Image (spheres, grey):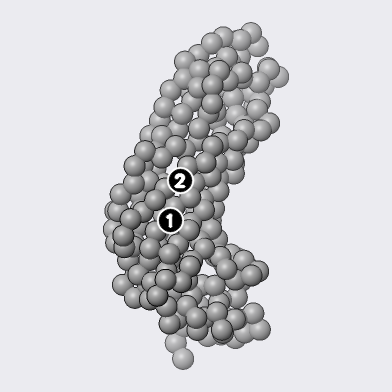
Amino acid sequence: MKGKLLCFGGIAVSLSIGTLAAHSGEIDMAVMQKWASAKIVQYRVEGLHSGREVIVYGDYEGKADVTDRITVEFTWDIKKSKIIGLVTVTDGKSELNNIKSDGTNCPPPQLKGEYEHFQSVSNSMVSGDQIQITGKRIYPPASVSNYPGGCSMRGIPGGTEEALLWVTGAGPEALGMPDMPGSPISIAADRKSFSIKGAGNWVWTYTPTLVQ
């Protein structure tokens, strides 16, 4: 029997029968059969960003551990591998910790407003199975050190930059597959969701609800 090529979040994963046999004890046939017979699902895709990022505008020292969240909901036609109907995007607020002037002995920057790692502005379909979310990164005015000229502080203006995210439709049959080490797909223990590591320190968790 031939291997199977599955596509999850734009990532093609080849699953050979030999690989599946090695993990056969972890395959949930009931879950696989449920989603194999499905036609339409509603997806809730939760994006979680976690990484160390520059939080001041321009070429200055100032970083923080940044957590950000965004939720994307859409309807997925499994047979056509196509997103149908409306797409909704809900932003979360960025959270900052461990703010420092990395690589210096100077005090950390002092933000005079809120930093937003990603704030959505609009979304559009770039293909039948991919959503592009256009957004902006917002840097507040801040006080930063004069490093390398010294550690005295000076004020700088804030600014914005355009930022883009992409979310791709995915096959829910992944929920029945084994959670294989090294795979780009991580299956939740309860088999109700799966996660995909994306670019820019984002992880996308897909939770499908059967519609038809």
Horizontally, residue 78 falls left or right of residue 155, namely left
Task: Kindly check if marks 1 and 2 are in contact, taking CB atoms under 8 A apart as contact.
Answer: yes
Local crowd size for mark 1, using a 10 Å CA cut-off: few (<14), some (14–19), many (≥20): some
Tag 1 residue: 73
Kind of residue sitting beneath label 2: Thr
Q: Is residue 139 visible?
A: yes
Q: Residue 116: x and y, percent?
A: 50, 32
**Which residue is farthest front?**
211
Q: Position of residue 120 (x, y in %)?
A: 41, 40
Q: Residue at x 51, y 17 (%)?
A: 141
> In this figure, which residue is indicated by the disc labeled 2?
90
Q: Say the numbered circle drawn on residue 20.
A: none
With respect to residue 107, does 86 lie above or below?
below
Mark 2: give few (<14), some (14-19) or many (20+) Cα within 10 Å: few
Q: Please tell me whether residue 208 is drawn above or below residue 133 in the rendered image.
A: below
Q: Residue at x 54, y 72 (%)?
A: 175
Above or below for 138 versus 13: above
- Mark 1: which amino acid? Glu
Q: Quadrant of the C terminus?
A: bottom left
Q: Secondary structure at mark 1?
A: strand
Residue at point 68%, 17% (across, down): 106
Pick the residue in front: 116 or 89.
89
Q: CA distance from mark 1 to mark 2?
A: 9 Å
Location of residue 182 in the rendering, given as x and y in whole percent from the top left corner: 60, 65
